[in-house]
């Protein structure tokens, strides 16, 4: 894993041997953080009302003006955040004592919106990100947990260290802005692990990218600055469920809807060639 080309946040230095910047893929967490911190002012109709992102960004002191200036990406992130908020609220209304899990959480904070006083939330990411998260955003209650995981490992589910009571209810799992940075077989294994371990009625929210973007992250105005690469994309929504017989597609939507009828019309024109949305959100269930 190479180090980000941006001046990315430095990890807290526990050993006293000098701090290190985040690697390229972890540093992509700055893109949604900047969008949630600054996007509401540009797109009030899509505002996500993040009460912590701006404070975190100030504490990091990283220059993210280029990310905030990438308006289509900011809009897509606000759009996905609002839909995940809505899906989470509906899920916890039906399962008030259930657990939520954010895989590859970065510095996002969904529990500020989804805490109902009874549910529990687990934020999970690579160790270097969780070190930063612990320093900036320590758990605020016993119903907020953190886990160091690498979802490329076949044993990542075990690393969540879910107690038996977590599996007494369906789980609400979010994995946004993450799977595109995994090799195709690793991304499919993440979906299959969820299907293998999650109790019936559980949901997994993912944001698939088109296969045509694979290998072209350099051309992306925000991701291109981080040095990360897109490794996985789809050409059919059916690919999301093909890796495990328990998986089913509950709902899918395209980010083209952010751009009104023009966006949807363009996507309809391209769809014979691209197959799946250029970028979208999918709710998978078991
Ligand atoms: C674009 S950021 C998205 C962060 C967060 N989901 C959000 O929307 O704000 C990608 C995140 O995925 C995490 N990630 C990438 N590969 C991972 C892996 N193998 N295991 C766990 N997390 C990973 C990164 O560390 C980073 O925090």
Image: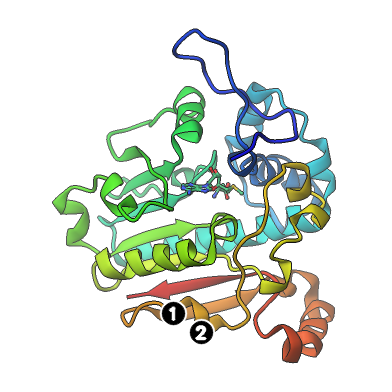
- Looking at the rendered structure, the secondary structure element under dot 1 is loop
- Residue sitting at x 64%, y 37%: 2
- The residue furthest top is 16
Q: Which residue occupies 44% across, 11% down?
A: 15
Count residues near mark 1 (Cα–Cα under 10 Å), then give few for <14, some for 14-19, many for 20+. Answer: some
Viewer-closest of 245 and 115: 245
Q: Quadrant of the N terminus?
A: top right
Which residue is at the far bottom? Answer: 272
Residue under the point 79% across and 55% down:
220
Asked if the beta carbon under badge 2 is closer than 8 A to the nearest atom of ligand 1, the reply is no
Whether pointer 1 and pointer 2 mark residues with C-beta atoms closer than 8 Å, the reply is yes
For residue 29, the mark is none
Picture residue at 67% right of the left edge, 69% below the top: 279
Asked if residue 253 lies left or right of residue 217, the reply is left
The image shows residue 66 at horizontal and vertical percentages of 83, 40
Q: Which residue is mark 1?
A: 241
Position of 38 relative to 62 (above/below) = below
In the foreground, 184 or 47:
184
SS for dot 2: helix
Q: Is residue 165 above or below residue 24?
A: below
**In the rendering, which numbered label is found on residue 238?**
2
**Residue 11: % across, % down:** 55, 23
């Amino acid at each position: 894993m190479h180090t980000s080309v941006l001046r990315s946040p430095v990890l807290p230095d526990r050993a006293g041997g000098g701090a290190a910047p985040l690697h390229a893929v972890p540093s992509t967490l700055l893109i949604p953080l900047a969008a949630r911190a600054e996007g509401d002012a540009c797109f009030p109709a899509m505002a996500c009302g993040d009460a912590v992102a701006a404070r975190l960004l100030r504490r990091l002191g990283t220059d993210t003006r280029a990310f905030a200036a990438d308006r289509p990406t900011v809009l897509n992130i606000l759009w996905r955040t609002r839909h995940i908020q809505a899906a989470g609220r509906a899920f916890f209304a039906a399962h008030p004592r259930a657990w939520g899990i954010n895989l590859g959480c970065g510095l996002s904070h969904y529990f500020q919106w989804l805490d109902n006083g009874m549910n529990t939330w687990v934020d999970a990411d690579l160790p270097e990100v969780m070190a930063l998260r612990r320093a900036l955003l320590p758990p605020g209650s016993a119903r907020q947990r953190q886990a160091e995981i690498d979802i490329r490992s076949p044993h990542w589910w075990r690393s969540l260290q879910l107690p038996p009571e977590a599996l007494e209810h369906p789980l609400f799992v979010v994995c946004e802005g993450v799977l595109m940075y995994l090799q195709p077989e690793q991304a499919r294994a993440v979906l299959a692990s969820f299907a293998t371990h999650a109790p019936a009625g559980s949901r997994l929210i993912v944001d698939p990218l088109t296969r045509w973007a694979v290998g072209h992250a350099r051309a992306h105005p925000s991701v291109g600055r981080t040095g990360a690469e897109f490794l996985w994309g789809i050409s059919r929504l059916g690919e999301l469920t093909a890796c495990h017989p328990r998986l089913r597609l509950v709902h899918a939507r395209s980010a083209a809807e952010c751009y009104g009828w023009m966006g949807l019309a363009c996507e309809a024109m391209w769809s014979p060639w691209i197959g799946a949305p250029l970028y979208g959100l999918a709710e998978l269930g078991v």
